[in-house]
Amino acid sequence: MSNQEKRPKILYSCYAQKSSEGEQFIPNHSVGLVITGASEIFIGGEKFVFSDGDFRFFRRNQLARYTKYPPAGGEFKSISINIDQEILHSISNEYDLHMQKPNHDIKGLALEANGLLKNYIDSIWPYLDGNNEFNQALIDLKVKEAVMILLQTTPILKDVLFDFSEPGKIDLEAYMNANYKFNVDINRFAYLTGRSLATFKRDFEKIFNLSPNRWLQKKRLNDAYYLLTEKGWKSSDVYLEVGFKDLSHFSFAFKKAYGMAPSRVGI
């Protein structure tokens, strides 16, 4: 399964209210800037916090949770540049750049706000104006420029950027127990655990004695019930925390499992 995703290579985000509905999977390396506001990102047990003027880098093939906070009376704004594998392969071939030693320690990284990165961000503003149209080749050049700046300013990223390996087969039980709250589809879990979809389903049922979808829903509902009954959470806060896509789906599944709407728990 390919990790490539159809999404803008240069993306501008703007939120007037707190948002916890960020991407749950990072398919490509990305470099970006928080313009205003603050963001919290949880990846692999690590918490990253960024605020106004902070540049950040995230490596590909990771599950992540984002919360974005606008400033008082303002909006959260950020710019992200998604670096796809095709461009990296092209740079690798053109400049004979290759990974020397795998570096799995870097999940995310705060980047120094140097002149090269600041000038680069200034140069891509025209690409964020919906009134301007640019051909794909021109956009690819700007992404390539971002890679060359990273290599110049943060050399440690070379072994991350040019690591073209795919996820290997890992401990399925441990991985799922650690990551079941991430709202991604079964295909993605299969890919991240180094399995075909068929092998993933077969291995999963051997370990858990349930299909992946049934197990995920049961685990998430159990967590939701605990948060509602023991912690006093509101159903409108619980559903995202435990991995449901929307409140209506969560409410329907919860009522079917427990015989009452989540909003009625504790009343």
Image (cartoon, rainbow, N blue to C red):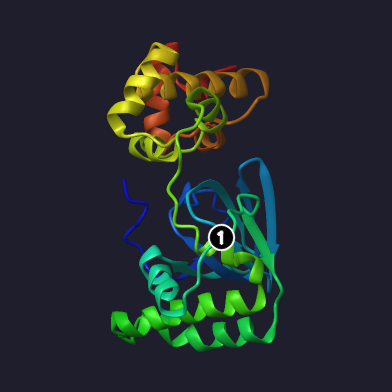
Residue 186 visible in the current orientation: yes
Q: Is residue 134 above or below residue 256?
A: below
Horizontal side of residue 210 vs 135, given as left or right: right
- Count of number-bearing discs: 1
Amino acid tagged 1: Val
Q: Relative to the observer, which residue lies in front, 200 or 98?
A: 98
Residue 83 place in picture, x, y as percent: 45, 67
- Residue 110 placement, left or right of 259: right
Residue at 49 percent across and 21 percent down: it is 219
> Is residue 208 placed above or below 25 in the rendered structure?
above
Does residue 137 appear to the left or right of 120 in the view shown?
left
Quadrant in which residue 53 is drawn: bottom right
Residue at image point 37% right, 23% down = 212
| Residue drawn where x is 46% and y is 79% of the image | 95
Q: Which residue is mark 1?
A: 160
Left or right of 186: which side holds 242? right
Q: Position of residue 173 (x, y in %)?
A: 51, 22
Q: Quadrant of the C terminus?
A: top right
* Image quadrant in which the N terminus is located: top left
Question: 205 or 38: which is nearer to us?
Answer: 205
Vertically, is 226 above or below 129? above
Residue pictured at 44% horizontal, 57% vertical:
164
Is residue 39 visible from the viewing direction of this image? no
Dividing the picture into quarters, in which one does residue 159 lie? bottom right
Please state which of residues 228 and 183 is positioned toward the viewer in this rendering: 183
Q: Residues within 10 Å of mark 1 (few under 14, many from 20)?
A: many
Percent across and percent down for residue 58 are 57, 59
Q: Residue 239: x, y in percent?
A: 50, 33
Dot 1 lies on which element?
Answer: helix
